[in-house]
Structures are given as structure tokens and as C-alpha cells.
Amino acid sequence: MIAIWAFVAALHVSTPTAAEAERLARSGQHAAALDAFQALAARDADDLESRVWMGRVLAWLGRRSEAAEVFADVVARAPGRIDARVGLGGALVNLGRLDEALAVIADAEALAPQSSDVLALKGRALRILGRPSDALHAYDAAFTASPTDGDVIARVPPETREQMQYVFSRLELHGAGLPFSIGITSSMSGEGVGF
């Protein structure tokens, strides 16, 4: 009799809300978040927000190919979703499919030329391709597009920040001035972030 009630109770367990699933994801409970977003997406095939989150969580779990598939599906259904294009580009970068990633990033940049997410991802892809000068320009564009976004700073790898500091100090030392602006303020502290 208890088994029957447990079965009936299990049938009435509701699917978590999108807010609950997002909370799980942001708190690092990725497996539970993935289950929740999969349930939400299964309940509503047109819930693209849950699908984008599902792609993010898959990427965080290291399931890059699956993440790329989910993001590609969202891009096919809603080509204007910059977050899905950034997710797809990031998954492709992580898979080492850099030419494909740059094509996706270029499409995203054409749709949202001032998106700090797109520009920071472009910088990452260019850095991995061994194009540090182009990467520095992309990172600078990301800072310029969103000068108070502390997340932009966090997306720049430490070795690139050190390289930027070295290049800028050498230019200033020789009186050449800076080739582009780097005046950024951390949204966390309000203090300038020096490079």
C-alpha cells in the first residue's frame, strides 16, 4: 500500500520552474539543473530559454558536443538569439573547431556589434589561433562596449591581461601612446582596473 502512495506521489511531483532550474545552475548543482531544464524543454518544445540554459549546463559539465548541438538547434529556430550564438561559438572553440567558431562569432558580431560577450569570445578564439594582436583588439572592443562589466574582465585570461599590461607599458615607455583605449572600471569595486 505504501508503494502505491509513493508511486502516486511521484506522479504529482511538478517540474521545477525555470527560476528554480536557473538557481540550481548558478549554485553549481549542474546535474540537477540539467535534469530540470531537460524536463522544462520536454514539457514545451518552444521553450528556447530553457534550451539555452540546457546548452550552458552541458558545456559546464564538459559535454561540449551535446552543448553545441543544443545551441545549434536554438540558433536554427531563432537566428537572432545572440546568447545561443555565443554558446555555440564557445562550444565550438572548446571542441577545437575554430574555423566554424569564427564563422558563428562573425555572424553574432554582425547582429550585435557592441556585444561584450561576442567580442570577448572573439578575443578568446583569436588568442587560441595564435593571433594575439587581433585578440587584444577584440578584448579592448569588449571593454569599450561594456566598460563597467566585471564579467568582461573575468573572461580575459590572466596571461592575456599580463600581455596587455606589458604591451601598453612598453608603448607608453617609448612615447607611442596607446593604440586603443583600455579605460575600464570594475563594477565590483568601482576602482580602475590597470593593464
Image: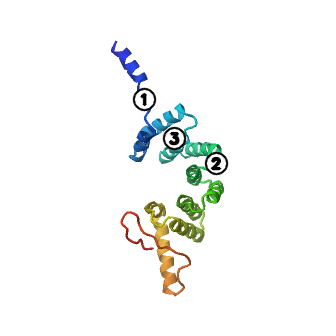
Residue at 54% of width from left, 33% of height from top?
A: 44
Q: In this picture, is 38 found above or below 3?
A: below
Q: Residue at x 54, y 85 (%)?
A: 176
Q: CA distance from mark 3 to mark 1?
A: 16 Å
**Residue at numbered disc 3:** 50
Residue on which disc 2 sits: 79
Q: Looking at the image, which is closer to me, 182 or 29?
A: 182
User: Is the Cβ of the residue at disc 2 closer than 8 Å to that at disc 3?
Assistant: no
Q: Amino acid at mark 3?
A: Ser
- The 10 Å Cα crowd at callout 2, few under 14, some 14 to 19, many 20 or more, is some
Q: Position of residue 88 (x, y in %)?
A: 59, 50
Seen in the image, is 120 located left or right of residue 19? right
Q: Is residue 188 above or below residue 178?
A: above
Query: Which quarter of the rendering shows the N terminus?
Result: top left
The picture places residue 164, in percent across and down from the top left corner, at 50, 73
Q: Residue furthest top?
A: 1
Q: Nearer the viewer, residue 128 or 192?
A: 192
Cα–Cα span, label 2 and label 3? 16 Å
Is the residue 57 above or below the residue 103 in the image?
above
Name the spot of residue 150 as percent of width and height, x first: 43, 62
Q: Amino acid at mark 1?
A: Ser
Among the two numbered marks 3 and 1 on one chain, the one whose residue lies closer to the N terminus: 1
Dots 3, 1 in contact, CB < 8 A: no
Q: Which residue is mark 1?
A: 14
Mark 3 neighbour density, 10 Å: few (under 14) some (14–19) many (20 or more): many
Q: Is residue 122 left or right of residue 23?
A: right
- Image height of 33 relative to 109, above or below: above
Indicate the secondary structure of the residue bearing disc 2. loop
Q: Quadrant of the C terminus?
A: bottom left
Q: Mark 1: few, some, or many residues within 10 Å (few <14, many ≥20)?
A: few
Amino acid type indicated by mark 2: Pro
